[in-house]
Structures are given as structure tokens and as C-alpha cells.
Image (cartoon, rainbow, N blue to C red):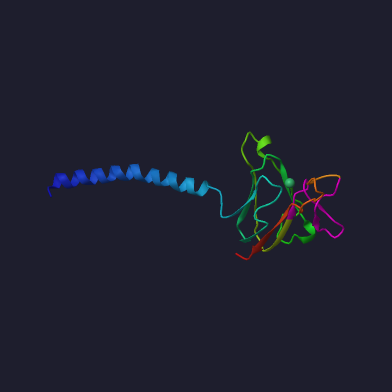
Amino acid sequence: MLRSQSRLLAIAAGAALVVLVPAAAVLARQGAASPNVSGVQVTMPDTDQFQPFAVTIHAGQTVQWVNQDTDDHTVVSDDAFNTAGHLGVNQIVVGTDNNGGQPGKFQLTFNHPGTFVYYCRFHSHLDKVNQPIAPGPRGGIQAANGNFGTPMMGIVTVLPS
Ligand SMILES: [Cu+2]
């Protein structure tokens, strides 16, 4: 290779680095900015339930609730059985009717092991010993046959990371 060609290649390589390094920096920043979405999703379909009823994750992971129903639902922690943190959660997760046709979303990241028992206060309530029970005749889910259904509740089990 001629000396002048070698010099031209070196200049070209330098120019390539000038272009590539900022691009890599931008990619790294985008990676750092993206949220931790490691975990599981629980949906509220067009029936009054959390699906799946029970999920298992590891500490550090996130549960995302996605309300695909037209109606609003809630995620309320049953603190008598809550050993996984997030005491006192009482969150409305809007349905598509109140969210421009899009599913409402809510998420919690669990950072230590335990259980997170929760229910929807619109479609369940707690009895004397804090067990979620189906709503009675004055509210909640009521079918024509008198079946008040099952309480709308779920459980997250958080294992060590
Ligand atoms: Cu509900």
C-alpha cells in the first residue's frame, strides 16, 4: 500500500469513529432510560376478575395490571396478609370507557420476598377476618340467579431474587 493511501485510510477510520462514537453513546443512554419491565402482567378482562389469579415473581420484578374491561377496577392491598411491601395500596385502574378507549395500567415493583394479597373494592370486600368475599345483595357483582360470583381478588408471591 502506498503511504498516501495508508494516510487516507487512517483519516477515513478517524471519521468513522467520530460518527460511530456518538451513535453508541445515544444507544447507551436510551438503554439506561428504558424502564425495568422484567416481571409479569395481570389483566382485567371483560369479566370482573384478575387474570391470572395468582402470579409468582422474584424480588426486583414488576407486576403490571392492565385493565382491558370497559369498567374501572381497583387494586387494593389486603394488608392483613401483605408481607411483600406496598402497604395501603388503593389504586383505581381505569377501564377503556374512562381512558379514551385504551386499557388503564398500574404497576408495582416488589423489592423483597413475601405475599401481596389484593382485591378490587368495587367487586369484593373484606370480612371480619380480612378475607376477601363476594359483594352482597346491595352492591357488586349480582347475577339474575342470585349468584354473587367470586370476590375479585388476586395474589402475588414474591420469591427471593
Ligand atoms: Cu373490579
Identify the image quadrant of residue 87: bottom right
> Residue drawn 52% across and 46% down?
33
Q: Give, as a single range, the part of the protein colored magenta.
A: 118-137
> Residue drawn 62% across and 35% down?
101
> Residue drawn 60% across and 57% down?
61
Q: Is residue 155 above or below residue 26?
A: below
Q: In the image, 18: left or right of 155?
A: left
Identify the image quadrant of residue 4: top left
Task: Report x, y in % for residue 7.
Answer: 19, 45
Task: Report x, y in % for residue 146.
Answer: 82, 49
Task: Report x, y in % for residue 15.
Answer: 29, 42
Q: Is residue 77 above or below residue 7?
A: below
Q: Is residue 103 magenta?
A: no
> Residue drawn 51% across and 49% down?
32
**Residue extending farthest front:** 145
Task: Report x, y in % for residue 11.
Answer: 24, 43
Q: Nearer the viewer, residue 12 or 146?
A: 146
Q: Is residue 124 magenta?
A: yes
Q: In the image, 32: left or right of 90?
A: left
**Residue extending farthest bottom:** 160
**Residue extending farthest left:** 2
Majority secondary structure in the magenta region = loop
Q: Nearer the viewer, residue 61 or 5?
A: 61
Give the position of the C terminus as an image quadrant. Answer: bottom right
